[in-house]
Image: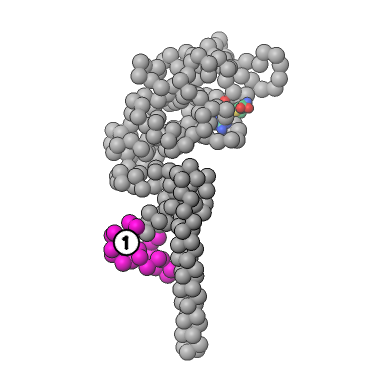
Amino acid sequence: MRVDILTLFPEMVTPALTGSILGRAAKAGAWSLGVHDVRDHGLGKHRTVDDAPFGGGSGMVMRPDVVAAAIAEVRRPESYVVLLEASGTRFTQAVAQRLSERPHLVFVCGHYEGVDARVRDVLVDEAISIGDYVLTGGELAACVIVDAVVRLLPGALGNDASIVDESFSAGLLEYPHYTRPRDFEGHLVPDVLLSGDHGKVATWRKRAAEARTWALRPDLAAALGLRDPALVAAETQALAEAKEARAQARRAARAARREGG
Ligand SMILES: C[S@@+](CC[C@H](N)C(=O)[O-])C[C@H]1O[C@@H](n2cnc3c(N)ncnc32)[C@H](O)[C@@H]1O
């Protein structure tokens, strides 16, 4: 996949998208990045990119002719051009999946009061928002989207199975993860995860994912038709058992200290 980002602040974007896993994925050939300064298309000797809004009001608006020239420089027949905008389609894992199937993504980052409305109307394929809040510019939003999209590309992560299991991939939150120590200050790892029985572990994880989704994101659970209160009861019982086990461990530790001292 090719990604081109059009911005007035390239220095905000490049470091965020070239380190760590995304950087390795680029070296492995899963994707490539171009970051372009919209000011290169600015007008006159001051390379002006914005102007005051018609009708009055505060702030400056990015000019559509300047943005159009920046898009034209990178657009190809297969390009999908996305404008970052607070009023756009809400970004979700499903949108990330959809974008990951495109060969070429172009992101247009607004700044100041935003971009002239005609950019959205006639120059781009879609406007996307990363949430119901207002950022100072589209750069961080573009980085969030590119990060979520690139990690879905074949070969971008070492272990593709981790994509299948994780939160939102099947509409569920992911099951909880545990590592050493087995006993962290009296909080024990569920026994089943130490049993070595892969079938039981898989069943536990599926149930735990459903129970967590039910408990933490009932909106997602409802969308999936996960309404079985038995799952919640099973989780409640498991939590009660874990709590009792922790209490027992604490009692045993206190008794051992008394004997020792
Ligand atoms: C200060 S904002 C403009 C806000 C605009 N006047 C409004 O009320 O929607 C400047 C730029 O930040 C970006 N931006 C702000 N919030 C965003 C969000 N939630 N998602 C994606 N981009 C956002 C857009 O590119 C926008 O043009």
* Residue 172 point in image, percent of width and height: 43, 47
Judge from the rendering whether residue 25 lies leftward or rightward of residue 176; answer left or right. left
Quarter location, residue 194: bottom left
* Residue 20 point in image, percent of width and height: 38, 42
Q: Nearer the viewer, residue 108 or 123?
A: 123
Q: Is residue 12 at least partly visible in the picture? A: no
**Count the marks: how many?**
1
Q: Nearer the viewer, residue 19 or 46?
A: 19
Depicted 9 relative to depicted 23: above or below: above
Quarter location, residue 175: bottom left
Q: Residue at x 48, y 28 (%)?
A: 10
Q: Residue at x 59, y 23 (%)?
A: 114
Q: Residue at x 33, y 35 (%)?
A: 153
Residue 192 drawn in magenta = yes
Q: Residue under label 1, please give it.
A: 200
Question: Which residues are drawn in magenta?
Answer: 178-203
Residue 34 drawn in magenta = no
Judge from the rendering whether residue 50 lies leftward or rightward of residue 227; answer left or right. right
Q: Is residue 14 at least partly visible in the picture? A: yes
- Identify the residue at the far top of this view: 44
Q: Amino acid at mark 1?
A: Lys
Depicted 51 relative to depicted 83: above or below: above
Q: Quadrant of ligand 1?
A: top right
Q: Residue at x 48, y 23 (%)?
A: 126
SS under mark 1? helix
* Residue 74 point in image, percent of width and height: 40, 18
Q: Quadrant of the N terminus?
A: top left
* Residue 84 point in image, percent of width and height: 52, 27
Judge from the rendering whether residue 164 lies leftward or rightward of residue 88; answer left or right. left
Q: Alpha-carbon neighbours of circle 1 within 10 Å: few (<14), some, or many (≥20)?
A: few
